Amino acid sequence: MIDANVNAILIKVAGIGLKKQHLGKSLASMQPILRTLNERFGSHVCGEGGEYETLTLDCPAFKRRIVLTETESVVQDDKDFATVAYLRIKSAILEDKGADSSLIIITPPSILDHFGSNLYRVPPISSLSTNVQMTKYESTEFLDRPLCTRRRNWVAIGNIKSPSLTNMSLKEEALQCFQKVKDLLANENLHLTDIVHVTALLRTMDDFMPFNQVYSTMFGRSPPARACVAVTLPAPCRITLECFAYDTRKKDTRSALHVQGISYWAPANIGPYSQAISVDKTTFISGQIGLVPPAMSLPTPRDFRKEMVLSLQHINRITEALQHRNPTPQGFIVWLIDIQDLLSAAGIMVKAIESNKGASNEFSSPPILFVVPEALPKGALVEVQTLLRFTTEEETTDLDQDGTSNDSKGNKTSISLNITYFRDGISFFLHLRIPLIGFSGRSE
């Protein structure tokens, strides 16, 4: 932005090391300070963790520049380590830039970057190997009781449904579900704000908006990562929740990537969730559908391969923005509307994994679960989510499922696929993911 002659100033600060006196300063003048804070405390240079907000006063695409004529600095919370303050703009004018200042025509970037373009050219795999497990769960297997398991600082909660569904609105059902989650967390001395990931299963995507109205009141500024899909839940149940929480009362800190601005980078969140939550060297990335970021719409004409590739491109860009050391996928979940797209999806997944071996060149072959739901947000054909482990230079960057080191470098990818039909309703997610937390989640 600075190199492109974008003049943006700080209008809010809420991060460690940033003070009231930094309000109104340009990004160019703040760049050395922001880099120092990143090196010392890990704060995001671009403010993607909510460290600061900016206002663009001028850029090559503007016909006129904004000139602030009267401002006031307002302190909301005066903490020694992280003051929360904002710049109140009382008056401003538009100023002509002069005849010598010509507009720059900005060419939008391609929808697919180099990573995405390579994936889009991957042909479907010719056939599935013999280790594919086809499993169809019947509604009679749907669990009636909530589940709660603790392993060190991690708590997994599953199969949360309203205890009473008689003459109840969807919002009331959602509130009762969250109350049950609160009660289970309280038994572990935790709160809703300790949740790092939520899986929300709805009977129909028509309930997406009213469900979000309740969901948005449950969390603060850094809501959990999330996947929200429609499945055939046994009547009259319309909502089932499953979540992971982490006890941060020790020394571990939690960070969030919560981007709501529309750009060419990746989609803004379409619900009250964070793109990613990181804690205990583990990152949960929310389920990504193949939206075209600047339009916030699915590609037209409909194209499964493009949606699949865009989902993985979004995950790749989110991972890069997190700036973690040696991020290593521990597993993928691919929500797939049409099982006929499986071979195409599998081929793209293999190529994506091979393209991201990590800085250490150690090879990772994470498990992949393909799940067939009823519907996805915005009518998407596919949604992809992942769990990452990030490390220090001294730590092992790649672990097998049994927790042992994987030293095979450069081997051809071999994936084992589980294909699960989710159209008869079953709460299996908890059982799938506890082993991942078991070997990848560490606590001192």
Image (cartoon, helix red, strand yellow):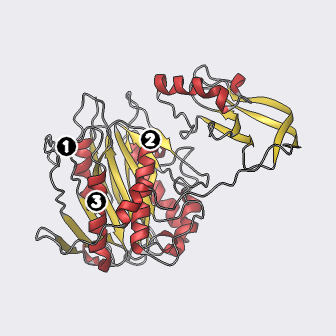
The reply to whether callout 1 and callout 2 are in contact (CB within 8 Å) is: no
CA gap between label 1 and label 2 equals: 21 Å
The reply to whether callout 1 and callout 3 are in contact (CB within 8 Å) is: no
Element marked by disc 3: helix
Q: Position of residue 436 (x, y in %)?
A: 25, 49
Placement of 132 over or under 251, stated as above or below: below
- 328 or 357, which is in the foreground? 357
Q: Residue furthest left?
A: 130
Q: Amino acid at mark 3?
A: Lys
Instruction: Indicate which disc, 3 or 2, sits on the residue closer to the N terminus.
Output: 2
Instruction: Indicate which disc, 1 or 3, sits on the residue closer to the N terminus.
Output: 3
CA gap between label 1 and label 3 equals: 20 Å
For label 2, the residue is: 322
Corner quadrant of residue 71:
top right
Name the residue rendered at 68%, 35% in the picture: 12
Q: Residues within 10 Å of mark 3 (few under 14, many from 20)?
A: some
For label 3, the residue is: 351
Name the residue rendered at 80%, 44% in the picture: 101
Q: Looking at the figure, which quarter contains the N terminus?
A: top right
Which numbered dot is residue 399? 1
Placement of 430 over or under 42, stated as above or below: below
Q: Amino acid at mark 2?
A: Leu
Name the residue rendered at 72%, 42% in the picture: 56
